[in-house]
Amino acid sequence: MNRELIESLEVLEREKDINKEVMFEAIENSLLMAYKNHYGKNENVVARVDRETGDFSITADKLIVEQVEDPACQISIDKARDIDINCEIGQTIKVDVKSKEFGRIATQNAKNIILQKIREEERKVVYEQYYAKEKDIVTGIVQRINGKNVSINLGKADAVLVESEQVKTEVFMPTERIKLYVTEVKDTPRGPKISVSRSHPELVRRLFEAEVAEVRDGTVEIINVAREAGVRSKITVKSNNKDVDPLGACVGVNGSRVNAIVNELRGEKIDIVPYSENAAVFVENALSPAKVVSVIADDVAKTAKVVVPDYQLSLAIGKEGINARLAAKLTGFKIDIKSESQAMSQMSDEEEIDIDEEISFEEEADYDNAENNEEV
């Protein structure tokens, strides 16, 4: 019994998640290759490894002849009768092949086949493990800073956080643990290529799913996410259970849940916006924390005219327009924001234009009447 082989395969399966059956097949293929390298090509060779004991055997079907010309496929009548005394020339007989007879080169080739299969299976296992995490978050450890890129260890694989997927305000230190969003996993000859991001909007969604049980089980649904990485994010939430407050669930007791996410995002502000099927109410909510006086929304044209108090105009627009821009991304509406004084001034101008048009029309009518009187 070859217990060492069985134990070795069990270790591979336990530590590297490589299926024992795959390795049994690889060993059988390596034995066939070793046979062909040593004896020559023979299509009727079978190699078997006992799955219980680990013992292996190689048998070859050979044609019984009087004079052997091809040892790989033929056997002399004298040697054949040592196996079966009743055999005759022209018959085929199964011959056991001793692997000890294989040459050094054939043995080395067989070893290389097994090692190559182990490496392939390792890559396959790692690829499948991380492919299952595509569009999800993983935790990594910062290894080193390579210029503008950051090398991240994800456990069984490494990833590179490129500059375009970083948040400009974030600075990392070696051995630091960070969460990343897996954007894509590709299978390559050198192993899986894992693309990760810290700036992707979906990172915020996944962090809420990990932190908020109600989001994770679907009681609270995140409809949309708009993000300016490193500055501010807005998420739209709605509850699928009338007894559950979506804002309260996401914020947590004393803000514990949302604060944990803010800390992971290095202080990035997060606005949690309740969803509404009423477009005007939805736009008003999206402009939070600014207070809104009125909203006129056009569902067809996807436009909204918003009036805010004068002192709230800068807050509604936000620094460099970020609040208005995120609200537009979140709702899908083109939002036109005006202060109350701007709106009143515009209304006054429109009224003056209407009055001028009426006066012009009356003057023109008087002029026409005067001409008619002269003609008479």
Image: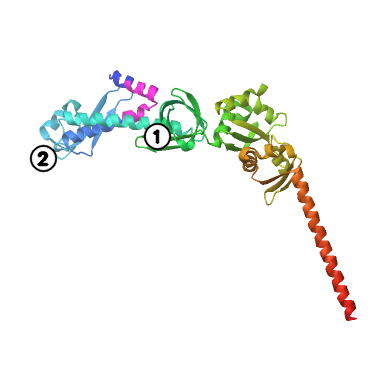
Residue type, numbered disc 2: Glu
Residue at image coords 16%, 35%: 39
Mark 1 or 2: the one toward you: 1
- Distance from disc 1 to disc 2, alpha carbons, whole Å, reads 49 Å
Left or right of residue 31: residue 283: right
Seen from the viewer's position, the closer of residues 100 and 228 is 228
Q: Where are the magenta residues, as a range? A: 8-25
Quarter of the image containing the C terminus? bottom right
Left or right of residue 188: residue 259: right
Left or right of residue 155: residue 83: left
Residue at image coords 82%, 65%: 360
x then y, percent, for residue 187: 39, 37
* Residue 88, picture quadrant: top left
Secondary structure under tag 2 reads loop
Residue designated by label 2: 69
Residue at image coords 30%, 25%: 50
Q: Residues within 10 Å of mark 1 (few under 14, many from 20)?
A: many
x then y, percent, for residue 105: 18, 31
Secondary structure under tag 1 reads strand
Residue type, numbered disc 1: Pro
x then y, percent, for residue 65: 12, 38
Going by the picture, which residue comes out furthest to the bottom? 376
* Residue 372, picture quadrant: bottom right
Left or right of residue 180: residue 231: right
Residue 102 visible in the snapshot: no
Seen from the viewer's position, the closer of residues 285 and 60 is 285
Residue designated by label 1: 192
73 over 50 or under it: above or below: below
Residue 123 visible in the snapshot: yes
| First in residue order: circle 1 vs circle 2 | 2
